Image: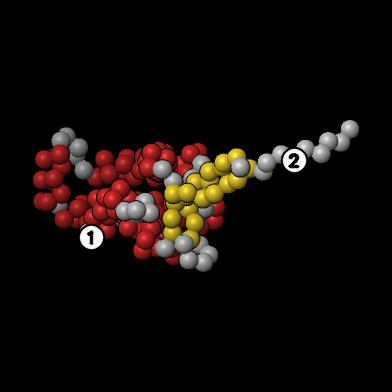
């Protein structure tokens, strides 16, 4: 039996992703990166530096420039691998694993999403000066701007969105 119901269609729209979803997705992604990338490298760093306490480790690195250079290189490689995790997943799927879990995604404000734009979004993961300043500037920019975008999103011409639905 066929019925001719004229049911309303679901209206969907894109909205800036809410702060708590963005934060939760980022924390999930950082945990994944720490487990997959950080853990193996952490064991290597522990073998290089006597980890009794921070001041002794710092003194050791200051007195051993070769060890300090090795730790700097390891830190750079870890940041590069973390950047690739974010950039490749966002470029290929528009989402990282954390974003998938909280149902948010990224999109280009301009035309098509490019790999370069995805790299620029995540450049803060390279732990060198002045890029580390983005750890402070990006969240502040997100909180205090009208369109709720990080500075790195503005520069990369991307935004983080969620699809919301309304019944008409």
Residue 161: mark? none
Q: In the picture, which quadrant includes the N terminus?
A: top right
Labels 1 and 2: the sequence-earlier one: 2
| Location of residue 118 (image quadrant) | bottom left
Residue at mark 2? 6
Q: CA distance from mark 1 to mark 2?
A: 58 Å
Residue in the image at 86% along x and 36% along y: 2
Residue at mark 1? 130
Residue 59 visible at all: yes
Locate residue 148, reporting x and y percent: 37, 51
Locate residue 64, reporting x and y percent: 14, 52
Residue 114 visible at all: no
Bin the neighbour count of mark 2 within 10 Å (Cα to Cα): few under 14, some 14-19, many 20 and up: few
Asked whether disc 1 touches disc 2, contact meaning CB atoms under 8 Å apart, the reply is: no
Residue in the image at 16% along x and 55% along y: 65
Q: Nearer the viewer, mark 1 or mark 2?
A: 2
* Secondary structure at numbered mark 1: loop
Q: Which of these two is toward me, 64 or 53?
A: 53
* Secondary structure at numbered mark 2: loop
Q: In the picture, which quadrant includes the C terminus?
A: top right
């Amino acid at each position: 039996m066929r019925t001719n119901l004229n049911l309303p269609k679901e209206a969907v729209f894109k909205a800036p992703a809410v702060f708590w979803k963005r934060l939760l997705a980022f924390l999930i992604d950082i945990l994944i990166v720490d487990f997959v990338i950080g853990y193996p490298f952490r064991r290597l760093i522990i073998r290089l530096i006597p980890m009794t306490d921070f001041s002794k480790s710092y003194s050791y690195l200051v007195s051993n420039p070769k060890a300090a250079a090795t730790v700097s290189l390891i830190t750079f490689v870890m940041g590069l691998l973390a950047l690739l995790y974010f950039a490749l997943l966002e470029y290929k799927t528009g989402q990282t694993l954390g974003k998938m879990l909280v149902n948010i995604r990224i999109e280009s404000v301009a035309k098509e999403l490019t790999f370069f734009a995805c790299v620029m979004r995540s450049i803060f993961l390279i732990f060198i000066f002045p890029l580390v300043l983005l750890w402070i500037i990006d969240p502040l920019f997100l909180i205090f701007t009208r369109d709720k975008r990080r500075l790195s999103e503005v520069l990369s011409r991307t935004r983080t969105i969620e699809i919301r639905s309304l019944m008409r």
